[in-house]
Image: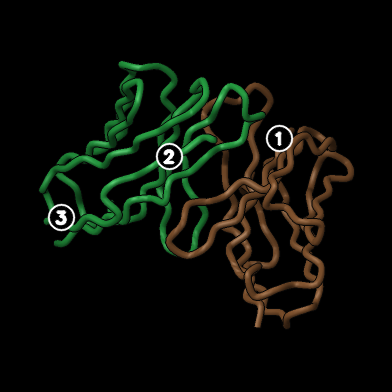
Chain colours: A green, B brown
Amino acid sequence: EDQVTQSPEALRLQEGESSSLNCSYTVSGLRGLFWYRQDPGKGPEFLFTLYSAGEEKEKERLKATLTKKESFLHITAPKPEDSATYLCAAESNFGNEKLTFGTGTRLTIIP
Amino acid sequence: DTGVSQDPRHKITKRGQNVTFRCDPISEHNRLYWYRQTLGQGPEFLTYFQNEAQLEKSRLLSDRFSAERPKGSFSTLEIQRTEQGDSAMYLCASSPPLGRDGYTFGSGTRLTVV
């Protein structure tokens, strides 16, 4: 069965303090690894898709990387508006487009 | 295009009642998904449509749950004889043909069963 594990569960950072979120996955044939941002009471908002080990994608202060077993979301010099829950999800080649999500990392940036 | 719309945003119902939720996907998107999310958890897959065909259903989708997408446009998710354990956020998402850059989610319907 496909599994996605995210760590830490929660992270508090000072504004400007860079850090990384981890996503470990066990999937039968990874088709894609997705990162989403979710604000309270809202649906997840798409950030990145990574398809193969070694791939990296960037968007503003966020950079996502992928290895054969895990993905990292690096946050550089975060601002308070980056506070949200960050969700990782994996899609298997055999899952008929089903995403398996982790439980997320709740990120709080303190001004 | 206003994105994926879900209605209602909130629903409070008594245990044993039936409820129905609606999802209007982005107009060019032929793929539509339903997920359920409880507090502190990630979304869990429920079902997937390509056009009007329901191609995948999770084991989580008991016989009290039914989803339809009659003309390949909007979709409905019905829960019969609601139970307190059905309380959750029900999320709808859509994606275009051959889309690989993630789904677009709606804002969800928050169901509370009392």
The residue depicted at 70 percent of the width and 73 percent of the height is B83
Find disc 1 in the rendering and name its residue. Answer: B31
Query: What is the CA distance from the residue labelled 3 to the residue labelled 1?
Result: 38 Å
Mark 3 and mark 1 residues within 8 Å of each other at the beta carbon: no
Secondary structure category for the residue under label 2:
strand
Query: Horizontal and vertical percent for residue B66?
Result: 81, 54
Same chain under badges 3 and 1? The reply is: no
Q: Is residue B107 above or below residue B101?
A: below
Q: Chain of mark 1?
A: B
Find disc 3 in the rendering and name its residue. Answer: A13
Where on the picture, by quarter, is residue A4? top left
Question: Amino acid under label 3?
Answer: Leu
Question: Amino acid under label 1?
Answer: Arg
Q: Chain of mark 3?
A: A
The residue depicted at 22 percent of the width and 55 percent of the height is A11
**Which label's residue is closer to the chain start, 3 or 2?**
2
Secondary structure category for the residue under label 1:
strand
Query: Horizontal and vertical percent for residue B24?
Result: 73, 50
Question: Amino acid under label 2?
Answer: Val
Residue reaching furthest to the front:
A1
Q: Chain of mark 2?
A: A
Residue A4 is labelled as 2
The residue depicted at 58 percent of the width and 62 percent of the height is B89
Is residue A81 in view? no
Q: Nearer the viewer, mark 3 or mark 2?
A: 2
